[in-house]
Every structure is written in structure tokens, then in C-alpha cells.
Amino acid sequence: MVTAVAPEISFLIPAYNAEDTLAEAIASLQRQTKSNWQAVVVDDGSSDRTWERLEVIAAADSRIVAARQTNAGAAAARNHAARLATARLLCMLDADDWLDPTFIETMLPMAEDRSPPAIAYCSYRRVAPDGRLMPVEQAPVLAGDAARREFSSFCALAIHTVVFPKSLFEQVGGMDESLQTCEEWDLWLRMAFAGAEFRRVDACLAFYRVKSGSLSGDPTKLVRDAICVTTKAEALRRQHGLPAEGPETGWITPAVSRLRMLVWVVAAKHDPNLDIQALAALLPDMPDAAGYESFFADVILHGLQTGLLRDRADDLIDAPEQWWPTIHPLVQLIERHSLPGTGRKILEAAAWQLSAGNLRRSFTLGAIQVVSVELGALSRIARAEQADTLIMHGFSGDAHIGTFVGPLWGDLSIRSQIRLIMQEMQAGDHLEQPRTLTYAAAWTREALRGYRTFGGLILRSGRRGRLEKLLVRTGRNAVLAGAPGDRQDNDARLSALLHNLEGGLPPVRLAAAAPAEEERAAQPQSAEDYWEQIFERPDPWNYLSIYEQVKYAQTLSLIPQGTETALELACAEGIFTEKLARQVSRVTATDISQRAIDRAAARCSDLSNVELRVLDFVRQQLPPDQDLILCCEVLYYMKDEEMLAGVCRKMAAALKPGGCLITAHAHLRCDEPGRTGFDWGHPFGVGTIRRVLAEQAGLALEETIDTALYAIHRFRKATVAAPILRVETHGTPMDVDVAKHIISGPTGIAREAAWATEVTTSIPILMYHRIAEDGPAALRRFRTLPETFRKQMQFLRRHGYYAVTAPTLANLLRGGKPIQGRPVMLTFDDAYLDFRTNAFPILAENDFSADVFVVTDKVGGRSDWDCAYGEPAALMAWPDIQELQQKGISFGSHLASHTPASAMENDALLAEALRSRHALESRLGAPVVSIALPYGATDFRVPGILSLAGYTTGFTTRAATATFSDNVFSLPRLEVRGDSPLEAFPALMGLPGALIG
């Protein structure tokens, strides 16, 4: 008799009709390297000889406690066993499974009965009915919140792989006896939400016996019980105030979790007679599986591999007849409840995984045809029926030399395969060049086509490398020209289709490209020449704007009553001079520019008290004995503080005793980085100017008018008591050329500073839809409030970001070199009318450009694709688009009909992509090469089709920052959600915690 006084762990073993396997399960305990254990075996009303076998085993080993109950189910039997267990740690072992001899020794140190409780878990292997060990089922990492998140979605652990404290089991109420399946999943879920810490043991220590015909159990019970567990999980998540479900938070919605169980059960059962519709009817709701395609492909393959007992996923290729009749209707079911094209993408992901397991295998899955070709033995490959997508792996001997993924139009002749190898795989070096008369003739033809290039390279020295490349290219073209092809092959069918589609479109006349801007001429030698150049255009700073007129009025309010003489420095074209002359007896207005003085003279011709003269107040003396000197918006142009101080001394000297100096200048960020100001490239702003003036002997600050953007100071050449401060507002609306230089809020970084000091290898591409106040509640996510958008743009401006458009972005990414500064791309889908009315003015005032993607068949209409959610929003008309293009906004395609690209056949997608680009180019008179796919719906075919349609850049909705490694036709974007708090925006930009608002 084997005995144990105080066991360290108790195993809870329900036994129902287990006479054939119970002894082996217990024997695995008796072989443990640590013997201080207890097994509580509960016969759950067996009808075979289980009880008799159990009595015999227990009689020989006092560590085994035998108990009996009427049949009540496995959960009830385990609860019964737990009540009889005496150890502080528990493990649940089924009567037909077993454990590795080191299970107790390895697991016990990791599990602890403490606060919070610690749970140990390990990996396991299934064992086929023939005794074959299946691959290890690796246990996931469940640290931190991962346990609650994972168990809210599925049962991440096998029942006999877990060791947990008995106190925790009792705390959560044991197993739910109302569940016939999924009871362990439910238990792990409740333990996770009770705060348990899950510790992974990186070892495979448990074995699960697969009985013939029993795998996956009763599908109806599994789906029904999964609904119960996920409903409980949702309630627990809300109770604990955890994040809402969704891809952004990592929490899978209950609906997706339930569909996951249904999909796995159907795949594992792989029974063509299974009523999938009846199972789906059990679900409270069918989710849209868009965005989860790879996820469900994984679930399907795992279910099939488990149900068919295949060691490797690619083994499924050998027997598609066993599972395709079940999987096909399952995928169709998902497609009916999802964004069109979702089913195709699930099969694509599955085909890719099957192919990745063995690149030598050729097979067809739905519309995806996978072929493996040996470059030394190419032969014609017929296109499989219904196939429109090709995955082609090229091999040269044992070496895999490349893979092509894209659309399929016809049979793969040898010529078609050679073109893909040379042009798409860039593996032409691996092709053998035949030494035949046909090849020689083809080579000669190719050489004659390029004879001028050949001759030029031969005549010029130092061109050997280019000559060699040309010879190689000519040879490859000759190989391609001499390869057999026909009218039914892939290339011929595609060529005919393109000819027909392009021939049906009227010609587009594009405007000639503007010549590249010449580099700026060197700065004029003299200050006079520089300012004459500035005044070539009348009123270069728009002094007639409301902003400037309010500033003028505030300046005039500081002029003392009864002022006799006034000297105005830098009077420009006399706009302020005209107003000043009505408040003082005599004005001498000066400027360095003769052009400016001539215009001022014309403006003030009827004012007899105005004298105008050209004066360089930096180099020349000022007229003395002035009652008032005005010097506004010009002192920033002093090259340094030394020059500024010299001018200030000169102005102070020109004043009579008791006279006043009034100066108005802007707040500059370089001068006052902690407050709103301009980012002009001057060395200093009003802060420094005020300080230097205050340092002049005899001058005292008397009164200040301060606004958010500028300050006006009056200094007096006398003793002053305490200066007066008046805080006032500036004039609005502001001219865009002024507003775009304003940086709002606290300290950030100037664009120039970021450009000079930072480089990056990634670019955030932000995705917006509407910028509007009102709209359907269901579409709140896609609608950003204008004031929120303004604060986001001000944040980007404050932190040194500059906008790039699609052509620039493509060049930067293709260049592969670190990018200077902080680039960002701003994109707007659908071309809503509120882009023109709300978004564009905010972009302009913050000096940002943007890319807008247009649904070309809907221009001037409404977003009818949203009609199920409420009143569709108005879209821009062609005149709106054309006007914005002239103002620097870039436009791209959003296809013609807003149909998901992955839902369209090859021919239809190519036709629509061509039609949309043609419509934009014909209206805008400029090339259009960018496209954002509606709903972000792309697949294996789409990039290739877009390239054929003439695009060079494509954008999806995949949430990531664009990097050099991204496919330029599948660039990710970061969605700026309208229902997210404003504070989430800095984190989206990689600046968590930065102040916004």
C-alpha cells in the first residue's frame, strides 16, 4: 500500500465509462518524480466497470480517493472531487489523459496559494487514436491583462495543464455545473477576473487522448456554451471598467469570439452534413469579420489540422475533398454577414499559410491558385477554373529565388512565367539563355531596337557598366521574345483587356508640368535692393486686412494728445501714415524703399502735413527733436542684438525730453517659446525688442497693449511711475499668410529645428473622413469636430510637423534614405463638402497641405454608401475640387463607386480603377497616381491591378505608421477617430502625454 500523509497537490479526476483508460491516467501520477500527491476520482454514474476498476486501484494506493455519484456531468464531478481534496493546490485531469513524470516537480514551484494567487500552466500534445503524438500546442503568454483579455475570447488553456490554489477555486465558486462543455474556459475566465496571476511553464507536460469520432464533441453544445461564457466575460469586463472591445484595444468582441467557436467546431468536425446555418442561428448576432480575416484563417486551419489529425497545416493540401465541402459554405456564411470580399481574404490568408508550409506544393483554394515552378524546366500551366489570384514560387534547383503574388488572367505560358520571373521577381539572372538560332535572331532584333544606345555607350569612355547592363537586358528581352506564348495566356488576355478598356476612354490632355523652381538668387548685396524687391508687389503684407487695421487702431490709441512732430520709420506704402497724419500736427514718414515712398506719396497727396523721404535708419542719422517716433514691424530685421541696440540708441537720441517712442512687434516663438507666437525666421521678437529698448538710458516703458500675437509699447523719454498694461484682442479673421505662421500653445519644436536635428525612417499617415459638427450617431467615429480638428492641426504645427503629399511620400519611401524633420501625411476619404467649408481653412491657417480621395462617380452628390445609417452627407462638386487643387490640395482616387476592391472581379476592378483615374485627370488636367481603397479593402490581386491602372501609390486602413518596408500599394494609415478624446491624439502621433488643447 502506497500512502501520503499531507499531499502537496490534489488531482480532480471525473470518470464516466472510463474502464479502458482510467488506470493509465492514474499510472501517469504514480510515475511522478514527486510522490506527495492525492488523486480524487469521482465515478460519474458509469454504466461500465469503471467503479470496480477504481476500487481495485484505490485499495492498492491510499493516495487515491474513490467517490461515486449519479450521473451529473463532468463539472459536477470535479466540484465533488474538490470538496474531498486535501491539498492546497489542485489540478484537473480527465480519466483518459495523462501527465509527464516531471509534471508535479516542474509545476508546483510556479503555483502559489497567496494574494494574489499564482496559477501555473504548461503546453500539451494531442495523441491520435493510433498513438501518434501530434505537434505541441504551445501555451500563450498570459501576463498582466492578457489573461482577462484572452479568456474573454476563448479557452486558451487545456484543462489538465493548469495547477491552481484550492482557495481560489472555492473563492470563484468552483465549476459552473450548468455548462456541459467549456466549463474549464469559464473557470479560467473567472479566476483571471479574480486577479490571479498566470505563470507559464515553458514545457510540454500534458497529453490529451483523442478518441476516434469524438473530437470537438457536440457542436450545438459547444456553440451554446461558448455563448454563455462570452456573455459572462462581457459582463465582467464592464463590471471591472476595462476597455471596450475592438481591434484598437486588443479586446475581441463577444460576437467575434462566438463566431470563432463556431468556425473552429465546423472545421474540426469537417462534416459536410453538418447544418452550419442551424449552428449560426444560435448566435445572438453575426459579426462583420472584416479585419479579422487572418484570424479566422488561423482558426479554420487549426480546426482542420486538429480534426483531421494532421501534423502540419500543409498536409491538408493532400485531401481537400475531406474538408472543402464544409469550409466553402462556412466561408460563404461569413461573407454574407461581412464587408464584401471578406470571404476571399480569409481564403487568401489560409492559402498563404498552407503554401508557406511547403513552397514546393501546387494547389488551388477557391480563387487562389498556388504554383511552384522550376526555372530550369518551365512548362505551360493551365489556369484553374475560377482562379483569379496567383501565388507563384520560383525555384532554381534547391534555392527559392522569389515569389509573385497578384492577379491571374489566363494560362501561364512559358513566356508569361518568364516575364513574371524577370520583371516581378527580379530573378532574371537565374534564367538560362538558350544558345539556339531562334534566340540569336531574337537577340539581334532586340539589339537593333536599341542600336543608338549601344553606339553611344561604345563611343563614350567610362560606360562599361552601363553597356554590360544593356547587354544583359537585351539578352533577357530576347529570352522573353523567343519563349512560347499564345492568345490564351495570361499576358495576351491582359493586353487585350487593357487595349479594350483604354480604347473606350476619351483622351486626356494634361497640362504641361511646371518647370522646376530655380534656386533662389543670392540675397541682394544692399538692404535697399532687398526692400525694393519686396515692394515689387503692392502691399506685400496686406496692411488693409482686419488684423492690421485693428493693430493700427490700437497703436493710434497710444499717441498722446497734442503731439506736434512725429517721425514714422519704415512707413511702407503710407497706409498707417494716412491715419497718423490726422492725429498729429506734422509727420515725417520714411522708408528705405523708393517704391514704397512713391506709393505712400500717392496715397497721402492731399495731406499737407506729411513729408515723405527715403531713409535707411540703420546707417543714417534720424531727424532730431521729435515729439513722437513710431517704429513698427521692422526691428526684427536687425541681424543681431548689437545692431538692434544701436538703432534703439539712435531713436532715443532723436526724441525730445518727454517725447514718446511707440513700437509694435509680434511675439515670436524663438523669443518666447512658452507662449503662442509666430515662427518667422527672425532672430528675435517683441520680447527682446522691449528688453533692449528698456535698457536705453533715459527711456522708460509707460504703457503696453498686449494681445495673443503682438504687443504695442509706448516708451517715454522721462521718468515714469508704474507702466500700464492693457490686454486686448487682435483682429479676426486673419489672412492665411499670417495665420499659417502662428504656433499655438506651450513649448514645442520649430519645423526648421526639427529639420536640422532629426531624421526618421517612418511617416505617420493620418486618415480622416468628415470634419463636421452634425451627422448620424452611428457614424460618429468618422466625424471630427472642427474645433477638435483645429487643435489637432495646431498640435502638429507646434511640434514641428510638415505635410507631404502622395507623390512626395512615394519618392521618400522608395528612396530608402532617412527623412529629415517630422513629416506627416494628412488624408481625407470620400471628398465630403465639409472638407472645403471646414477642413481646408483650418489646414491653410496651419500651413498644411492634404490629400483628398474622390469617389469619382459620386462627385457633386451624396455619400449614399452610408444611407443605412441616416441622411447621407454632401460631397464636393468638380468646381470645388478644381478650386482646391489650385490652392495646393492633392487629389487621388477612392475608386468610382465606393465598392470594396476585394469584392470586385479582376476585370471590373481594373476597369473602375482606370475610369476613376481618367475622370480625375480629365477634370484636373494633371496626373493622378494615388488611390485610397474604400474600407481599406485590399487583397493579393489589388496592388497589381492598381499598378496596371496607372497608379503608383495605394493606401489602406491598416493601422500602422508607414515605413520603407511597406508595399507602396498597401500603405497603412492611422485613423483619427472622431469619437476618441482629444487627449488620445498625441499618443497616436507617438508623443504620449504631450499637452494638447
Image (cartoon, helix red, strand yellow):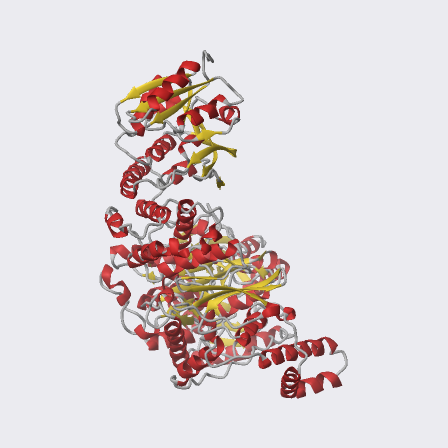
Please tell me which residue lies in front, 952 or 374: 374
Please tell me which residue lies in front, 9 or 483: 483
Where does the image place residue 490, in percent across and percent down from the top left?
A: 47, 75
Where does the image place residue 319, in percent across and percent down from the top left?
A: 43, 55
Q: Residue at x 37, y 21 (%)?
A: 53
Relative to 228, residue 647 above or below: below
Question: Residue 324 is drawn in which quadrant?
Answer: bottom left
Where does the image place residue 362, in percent across and percent down from the top left?
A: 49, 62
Please tell me which residue lies in front, 129 or 539: 129
Relative to 836, residue 142 above or below: above
**In the displayed structure, does residue 123 sit left or right of residue 215?**
right
Q: Is residue 784 visible?
A: no
Q: Residue at x 28, y 65 (%)?
A: 865
Where does the image place residue 918, in percent across and percent down from the top left?
A: 40, 79
> Which residue lies most toward the right here?
461
Q: Residue at x 36, y 24 (%)?
A: 169
Please tell me which residue lies in front, 450 or 490: 490
Question: Residue 561 is drawn in which quadrant?
Answer: bottom left
